Image (cartoon, rainbow, N blue to C red):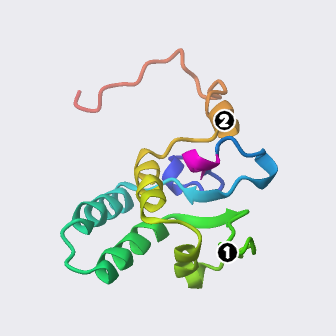
Amino acid sequence: MPLATDPEQVFEIVLESDKDKPVDIQPRFMYRYLSMREFRQVGNINDSIVAEDTADDAVDKTLKALSVGLIGWENLKDRAGKIIPFDPGKISRIEDAIGAIEAQELIAKILRQHPSISDKKKLDLPSESDTATPVTDVRE
C-alpha cells in the first residue's frame, strides 16, 4: 500500500532547534505522508507565501500549508510554558508556539516527508512479495 494512502504510516518532525532536547520533552509534529495532490497543494501555497502583500495573508497561507497532513503534535508549549493541546479545528494555536522561521522549516520538512528512524526501520524490512519473478512490461 502506498504510504500516502496507508492511515498507519506517519512521519514525525522535530525542529532543528529542539533536536538536542531530551526526547520525552521534544516538541514533535506528526504528519501523514502526502499524496501527490497534497504535495502540489503545499508546494504551491509555499511558493505563493512570499508574494503576499500583508503579514495576515502570509500567515494564513502558512497555516494552511502546515495543516495539510497534520494529524497531531506533542510537547508544544506557548511562551508561558503551558502545553498547547492539539485540536484539528484550532490549528491556529500553533501561532503561539512557533515563529516564521520554524514555520518555514516545518513546510520544507513536510515537502521532504522523511520517515522517523523507527519508521525507516519498518520500511527497510524485506518485502513479503515474490522478488524472484520479474514484472512483465505492460506494453508488451
Q: Nearer the viewer, residue 105 or 73?
A: 105
Image height of 118 relative to 102, above or below: above
Number of on-image labels:
2
Check residue 117 in the rendering and tell me which mark sits there, or answer none: 2
Name which quarter of the figure residue 63 lies in. Answer: bottom left
Q: Is residue 55 left or right of residue 4?
A: left
Which residue sits at x=23%, y=27%? 140
Q: Is residue 35 magenta?
A: no
Image height of 104 relative to 52, above or below: above
Image height of 127 relative to 28, above or below: above
Residue bearing the label numbered 1: 86
Residue farthest to the top, as pictured: 132
Sequence-wise, the earlier of marks 1 and 2 is: 1
Which residue sits at x=65%, y=72%? 79
Amino acid type at image mark 1:
Phe
Crowding at dot 2, Cα within 10 Å, few <14 / some 14-19 / many 20+, comes out as few
Amino acid type at image mark 2:
Ile
The magenta stretch is 12-18
Image coordinates for residue 133, horizontal then vertical, percent: 49, 18
